[in-house]
Each structure stands twice: as structure tokens, then as C-alpha cells.
Amino acid sequence: MAQPLLARRPAWTESTRRWPHVLFTQTDASFLLEAAVIGQHQETVLLSIAVAFVARCLLVLLFLPFSAMDKVINHRAAVAQARLGVGWAALAPIMLFAGLAIEVVMSLAILTGIADRLAALILAGYCIVTAVLWKQFWKTPDFRLKGASHGRDIFWDFLKNIALAGGFLMVTIGATASGVHRFLSHPLDSSRPYAVYAVNTADDGER
């Protein structure tokens, strides 16, 4: 593990008091150079955190704020759409409220990194369920691969939902298969999306 920068600064000794310029030119110069490099790295750290946050904003942008806001502004239309999907008028308002809660709470969890892996799994399931209930391209009478087709338009929406579910699953398990075991072992853990780990370039060069 790399030693903190200040801990590596040379101590002042009796010989240092007699020949301070020698120590500065031979040792402190490299120390100040390393401090300047770390200052540049801090800018990279801020940029990395910003990019990670923007990426998560783009991932949940469909739900928060737009879909959630649409359910509030166009409440009656949203209830009617929910009724078409579940086929039961009494259940439609409950489904709508549940969908609104999922979109807001789970999106905020992904943005903040609090239990974000579990939240992403829930949103992945939400995307698949909404695709199956409200993007039923297989029931349209005019589905075709060529020419004008309302069914094909719904098919593309269906695929977008499925693709978005895949993106959320990547947040849940990460980029490798080992993430499945980690998630099952600690489902409430955060993926620590804004953590920036220091890289020991000296150690890397020796490998």
C-alpha cells in the first residue's frame, strides 16, 4: 500500500539545518513535484466522480423526473393506461402508485449509491414487467418487419425496456460474473459508485 505523501516527506536533522539548500535540491524538489502531480490527480478525481454521476442520471432519466412527473400531471390518463395493463379497474390506482414509488425511490437510491444494487435489480424487474404488460407487440394485427407498422413501433419500445433492464442488471452485478455471488451475499451493500481508488504507479511498473 502506498504511504501517504506527507509521511514520506524527509525529516529535518542537524545536518539539514547546516545545509538546507542541499536537502531541498535533492529531496524536496521531488516531493514538490509529486505534490503537483497529486494536485492534477485531484482534478481527475472530480472529473471521474462527475462522469459517474452523469452516467447514473442518464440511466434513471426516463423514470426520474419524466415518467414520475407524467404520472402526477396526467393522473387520469395514467390510471386508464394501468387499467389496460392489469385488466382490473380497482387495481389500476394501486399499480400506478406502486409504479410511481418505484420510479422515485429506486432512482434516488441509484443516484446516491444507497443500496443501489438492490434498487437496480428492482428497476430491472420493473422494466421487464412494464414491457410485458404494456408493450405487447405480439397482439397487434399489423406487426410486420417491412413497411408501416404500429406493431413494430411497439416492438422497438419493448426492446428498449428490455435493454434498459440489462443496464440496471449491470449496476446490480457489475461487469463480471463474480458480482452475482457478491450481490447474493450482501444484497443491501452499495456498489460505491463514487469511490476513487488510488493507483500506485511505482508498484504497477514493477509488475
Image (tube, helix red, strand yellow):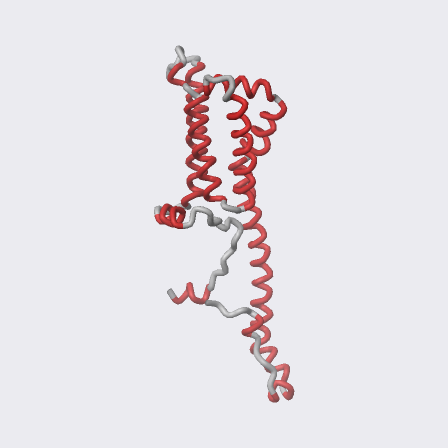
Q: Which quadrant holds residue 148?
A: top left
Judge from the rendering whether residue 201 lies leftward or rightward of residue 38; answer left or right: left
Q: Residue furthest front?
A: 90
Judge from the rendering whether residue 27 lies leftward or rightward of residue 168; answer left or right: right
Q: Residue furthest top?
A: 141
Along the line of sight, the residue nearer the viewer: 72 or 164: 72
Along the line of sight, the residue nearer the viewer: 166 or 10: 166
Position of the C terminus by quadrant? bottom left
- Percent x, y for residue 118? 46, 42
Along the line of sight, the residue nearer the viewer: 138 or 17: 138
**25 versus 100 height, above or below:** below
> Residue 146: in sight, yes or no?
no
Residue drawn at the location 57% of the way across and 62% of the way down: 38
- Percent x, y for residue 173? 41, 44
**150 versus 194 height, above or below:** above
Along the line of sight, the residue nearer the viewer: 189 or 34: 189
- Percent x, y for residue 71? 58, 25
- Percent x, y for residue 56? 53, 41
Residue drawn at the location 45% of the way across and 29% of the way down: 161
Residue drawn at the location 46% of the way across and 63% of the way down: 201
Q: Which quadrant holds residue 18?
A: bottom right
Judge from the rendering whether residue 86 lies leftward or rightward of residue 207; answer left or right: right
**Number of numbered discs on residues:** 0
> Residue 17: in sight, yes or no?
yes
